[in-house]
Image (cartoon, coloured by chain):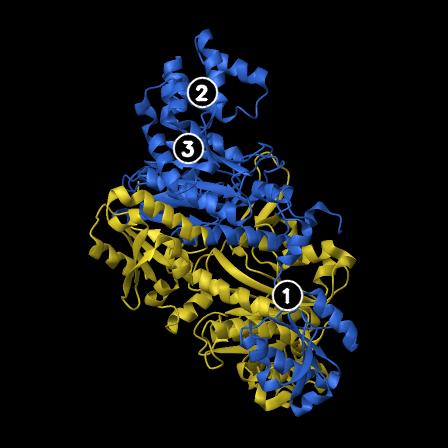
Chain colours: A blue, B yellow
């Protein structure tokens, strides 16, 4: 029975035992603290939504990538949320005109995709979402990008380890038009750009030829898809690469100046092949990748003005990104930032480990342990049958307790032994003083 | 379009805007800190499981209470988890003999029930789960009960506000047998006891009569279902109420002595009508209720020795409970512990609110804001077009910022104005010192 697949986690999902959970909470804590320090407020929505919330934009095609279902006897179709933006747009639309502007929201929900699991892509994953709703501005774009960078920095990743790749849908569309891509093929060209690193060069070339491009433009399309320009080269490099007037890259130029003021330019580069797969992006788009390009994108986002209106809300600008825990976890592990030894260090440290030297003293130990816990301290005791104090002190050290408290015969007189596990110093103390002596 | 039900949260689920999310995180923080201080380690599992994980114990009858589904083209049936214990038992079974004993786990997952939503009962809810796996003992039972009480105490509820109601499945079964309930009707008698407060007295009486009880025993069954004995009355009161030998209440007696040692007796009482609905409980069972009995149970749990073996693991004792956020939230709100004013206080406070007196100075403000955030501080700025410093100081006060930093003409010379929002004191400081002056 133990070997039955029915008694394993479903394919593409994860069991988080304490070490894995400590890693997850470590990542989430960096996300949360960066969000709060950047002035974003946390929200959350339902784990499943009406199926139409997803099909209204993307049509029935998306249904195969969703886990969808209907309650027995119910009338509505639901889907486990594959992403957070439709929920956020629905919530913003519900507030309507009462929404304060700008509204800065973050969320750390789980998401679901009914795809084949592969490296960096699971069927259930945690994703940090950061969104700023308000009048479109480069400051807003920079604010969400800066928040992503702040979290990565707190997780130990530097500008050498990850690259923030900036692009702009309007600028890329102008360049494609200049190349001769007909408007009817624009969506196909965007989709092709989005998959440029996942397709073999032959197939990429074949599909590009199918876009109706004049043969002479094919090489330039190919070049465009792979153009990476350092931010230091300035916006002129982008203009040259795209072959479009400077006015079409004006928003990117302003964004760069704000990122420079925020001292974040070293993290960023232009990557004109980036357009993002989802249909709702309207302006600046960006992805964050591990510097060597070894993994899928760590994060992706951009401006999606108009989406909230689509869900029945006012016409509002918005910009945001999503960052999943799966690829990020791989990047952190690859760089030794989440080695198993380190994961163990992430588990909570007890403030006091109680050892009762005699079963008759257990009631005193139980009361002292309660007192410490009520004082806000992390107090454990050995549940082992052994009353060998030396051996139990080893258990105290193993769980990295700050203090050990040995409840011996003197406890009936109100005294216990308190051992500082770092210094090894041990002394008798009054039980009434125990909590204040152990307090952090 | 805004009014379409498709663009609302599904029935029985919730949108958490920042004030509601702050309340949720406040409750979760109390749960988490109590768990950690009591030495429990956090785990998590998949949001959906193989449907068989739930039907193996309860048969097909449970399917109507589950949201179940199948991936398009897939072969397996899944269900959104209605509770955490099967996942925990599966995870413990997977560790097999390598599981350290005792293992102390907690989790704060979301759960789903496809029932009609009503007060205290939603289709999606958060539930704190605390479980101790190891040799059965009253210490273990008391450890999980103590953890529940610690969290409630930290949320502001005292022994006068909530009652921990203790019972024991074995003792109640012995009493039912003594009353003449045939073994074939035992499951029905338990189910009836579990629903005693939800059924009208007439219907309760009718169903009790259907259990095959001798007419003289019906009154005593009724009495048993409503017997509440203060812990201070001692175990003799329980023996008298149940009419069973003291040996059948020995485990309860030991539990009481440990709870007394832990100074928790004032929170507890015996309630012999408590048996818990789920089939897997085997010994001590308990529920926590608001003292007046006005709401559904805040928490429920008990001992479930043998469940892990059922999922293919070793034969292990286990005890645990679940506490949902919905009833608890109602109890806290009813007692004024989560009034809307208080919810606003739970939102994070900015350390520094930046005001740029002139658009030309925005780049300096952007850099200073980045510097503070990188130093681990919560820094915001006004995104308003207004440059009226007095008005913007009002915004700083409104979001309860600790300091306001006014970036004026002197900023080009390296000086900014720093205002302590609590004292109103304002002075010029060097930008290089700003982070250390604002540091908490």
Q: Nearer the viewer, residue A409 or B82?
A: A409
Label 2 Cα neighbours within 10 Å, binned few <14 / some 14-19 / many ≥20: many
Q: Please, what secondary structure does the residue beneath circle 3 have?
A: strand
Marks 3 and 2 on same chain? yes
Is residue A436 among what the camera can see? yes
Question: Chain under label 3?
Answer: A
Question: Chain under label 2?
Answer: A
Q: Nearer the viewer, residue A106 or A159?
A: A159
Q: How many marks?
A: 3
- Compared with B304, A102 (above or below) is above
Label 1 Cα neighbours within 10 Å, binned few <14 / some 14-19 / many ≥20: many
Q: Are marks 3 and 1 in contact (CB under 8 Å)?
A: no
Question: Chain under label 1?
Answer: B
Please state the horizontal and vertical placement of residue B216, each as a whole percent of the image. 61, 84
Q: CA distance from mark 1 to mark 2?
A: 54 Å
- Compared with A440, A11 (above or below) is above
Left or right? Give the position of A97 relative to B79. Answer: left
Q: Which residue is mark 1?
A: B131
Residue furthest top in the image: A215
Q: Please, what secondary structure does the residue beneath circle 1 have?
A: strand
Label whose residue precedes the other's in the sequence (3 or 2): 2
Q: Nearer the viewer, mark 3 or mark 1?
A: 3
Q: Quadrant of residue B254?
A: bottom right
Please state the horizontal and vertical placement of residue A148, each as a whole percent of the image. 46, 44
Q: CA distance from mark 3 to mark 2?
A: 16 Å
Is residue B15 among what the camera can see? no
Q: Which residue is mark 2?
A: A189
Q: Which residue is mark 3?
A: A285
Q: At 25% from the left edge and 47% from the top edge, which residue is drawn?
A: B384
Q: Quadrant of residue A413?
A: bottom right
């Amino acid at each position: 029975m133990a070997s039955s697949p029915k008694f394993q986690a479903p394919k593409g999902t994860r069991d988080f035992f304490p070490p894995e959970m400590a890693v997850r909470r470590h990542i989430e804590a960096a996300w949360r603290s960066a969000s709060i320090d950047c002035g974003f407020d946390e929200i959350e929505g339902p784990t499943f939504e009406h199926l139409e919330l997803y099909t209204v934009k993307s049509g029935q095609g998306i249904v195969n990538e969703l886990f969808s279902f209907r309650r027995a006897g119910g009338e509505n179709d639901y889907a486990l949320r594959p992403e957070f933006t439709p929920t956020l747009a629905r919530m913003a639309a519900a507030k309507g005109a009462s929404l304060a502007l700008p509204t800065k929201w973050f969320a750390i929900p789980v998401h679901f995709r009914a795809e084949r699991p592969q490296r960096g892509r699971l069927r259930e994953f945690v994703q940090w979402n950061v969104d700023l709703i308000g009048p479109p501005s480069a400051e807003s774009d920079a604010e969400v990008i800066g928040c992503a960078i702040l979290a990565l920095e707190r997780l130990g990743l530097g500008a050498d380890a990850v690259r923030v790749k900036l692009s702009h849908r309007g600028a890329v569309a102008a360049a494609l038009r200049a190349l001769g891509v007909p408007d009817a093929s624009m969506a196909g060209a965007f989709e092709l750009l989005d998959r440029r690193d996942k397709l073999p060069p032959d197939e990429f070339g074949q599909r590009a030829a199918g876009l109706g491009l004049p043969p002479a433009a094919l090489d330039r399309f190919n070049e465009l898809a792979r153009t990476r320009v350092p931010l230091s080269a300035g916006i002129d490099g982008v203009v040259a690469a795209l072959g479009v007037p400077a006015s079409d890259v004006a928003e990117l130029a302003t964004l760069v100046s704000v990122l420079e003021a925020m001292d974040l330019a070293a993290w960023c580069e232009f990557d004109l092949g980036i357009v993002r797969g989802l249909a709702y992006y309207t302006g600046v788009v960006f992805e964050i990748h591990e510097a060597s390009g070894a993994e899928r994108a760590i994060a992706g986002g951009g401006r999606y003005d108009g989406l909230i209106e689509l869900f029945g809300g006012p016409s509002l600008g918005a910009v945001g990104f999503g960052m999943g825990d799966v690829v990020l976890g791989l990047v952190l592990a690859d760089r030794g930032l989440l080695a198993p030894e380190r994961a163990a260090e992430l588990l909570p440290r007890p403030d006091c480990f109680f050892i009762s030297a005699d079963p008759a003293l257990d009631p005193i130990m139980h009361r002292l342990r309660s007192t410490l816990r009520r004082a806000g301290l992390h107090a454990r005791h050995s549940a082992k049958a052994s009353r060998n104090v030396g051996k139990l002190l080893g258990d105290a050290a193993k769980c990295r307790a700050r203090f050990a408290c040995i409840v011996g015969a003197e406890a009936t007189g109100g005294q216990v032994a308190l051992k500082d596990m770092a210094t090894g110093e041990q002394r008798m103390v009054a039980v009434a003083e125990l909590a204040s002596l152990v307090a952090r």
